[in-house]
Image: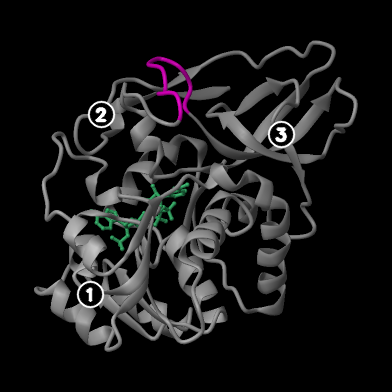
Amino acid sequence: MKIIQLNSRPVGVPQLSDFKMINEDRPKLADGEILLKASYISVDPYMRGRMMDAKSYIEPFELNKALVSGIIAEVVESKLEGFSKGDFVSGMLEWKEYQSSKGEGLFKVDSKGAPLSSYLGVLGMTGLTAYLGLTEIGKPKVGETVVVSGAAGAVGSVVGQIAKIKGCRVVGIAGSDEKVEELKSKYGFDAGINYKTTANMTQAIADACPDGVDVYYDNVGGEISDAVMLNVNRFARVIVCGAISMYNETSIPKGPRVQPILIKNSVLMQGFIVSNYMEKFGQAIPQLAKWLQEGKLISTETIVEGFENAPQAFIDLFEGKNKGKMIVKV
Ligand code: NAP
């Protein structure tokens, strides 16, 4: 069976040579264990941070060890009570075609209730991030203007749709004309801005938000966010979810200082990690599932076929090659 390991710590943009694939025998099962076969692997921007040997909210990946991410796997053999052959589980698992587990940290998922891959996206970590970041920190009110960066991605596309459900004017920022068009035609955003072709982002945001910005859901950081911050209203809420534009920087980027903006406008700016809200997952998932069922929420996935293509799928996140959630089908 194949295993994908971290070969070297990336400097700047990750390269395929930072990963390596090795072969090993399938694990033999002991009593109290299950044998899992990976079905879908999530590739996520935050994994870039774990590739660095730096202190964070989560341990760094180890060199020459398998990478780890959200995975949906099938139980192919069970010597553990409560798990049967044919069950599907979700959990933080290793990038291995097969692995054994004692069942810790695994959740069973209903393969009939929703497509299995959706438990890595809209009904999984990225959907929860969108919903909980927006509702717990952003607290959008009817008629307010919500701006979302990374708007055509897994988190951003769900944020924008929930903000529409909440009765807001929604403006998305994304990296191609095709993505911007889909924000409006597919997800119902009121306006979109292509940051790659817009010379003056501050003006473009002002034009798209005639009443200013009440909530900014930030997935990208950097210059895009600098421009949004120049358009915030009094008592705006800024949800600092991600900073993908800075993940491959090799030195600490400098930019405008935001403190005077925060003071002048009494702005709340808060970083968060979705796991801060773990106790709310149980109520958030049924809400997301209900909106999906009612057709109020559209889930988009970019599915890359083949276990061995997981490293390239991860690298492609930084080029914006995905629409919605990037997932590898094993
Ligand atoms: P995603 O948005 O589906 O994929 C990443 C997207 O980022 C790409 O499609 C690309 O879209 C955009 N991008 C790449 N490089 C960029 C750059 N230099 N400047 C601006 N945009 C760039 O990924 P996701 O999983 O939904 O995550 C979105 C953000 O949320 C990430 O920053 C991630 O780290 C963060 N996140 C945080 C939490 C948390 O708990 N705080 C949880 C999940 C995710 P374009 O074509 O538009 O450039």
> Could you say where residue 12 lies in the image, as x and y percent from the top left?
19, 35
> Could you say where residue 161 lies in the image, as x and y percent from the top left?
51, 74
Residue type, numbered disc 3: Leu
Residue 179: in sight, yes or no?
no
> Could you say where residue 182 lies in the image, as x and y percent from the top left?
40, 78
Q: Is 148 positioned to the left or the right of 230 in the image?
A: right
Q: Which mark is residue 10?
A: 2
Q: How many marks?
A: 3
Considering only order in the chain, which callout, 2 or 1, is on the residue closer to the N terminus? 2
Residue 12's place in the image compared with 212, above or below, is above
Gap in angstroms between the C-alphas marked 1 and 2? 35 Å
Q: Which residues are magenta?
A: 58-67
- Reading the image, the residue beneath label 3 is 106
Residue type, numbered disc 1: Asn
Q: Is residue 63 magenta?
A: yes
Of the two numbered discs 3 and 1 in the rendering, the one whose residue sits closer to the viewer: 1
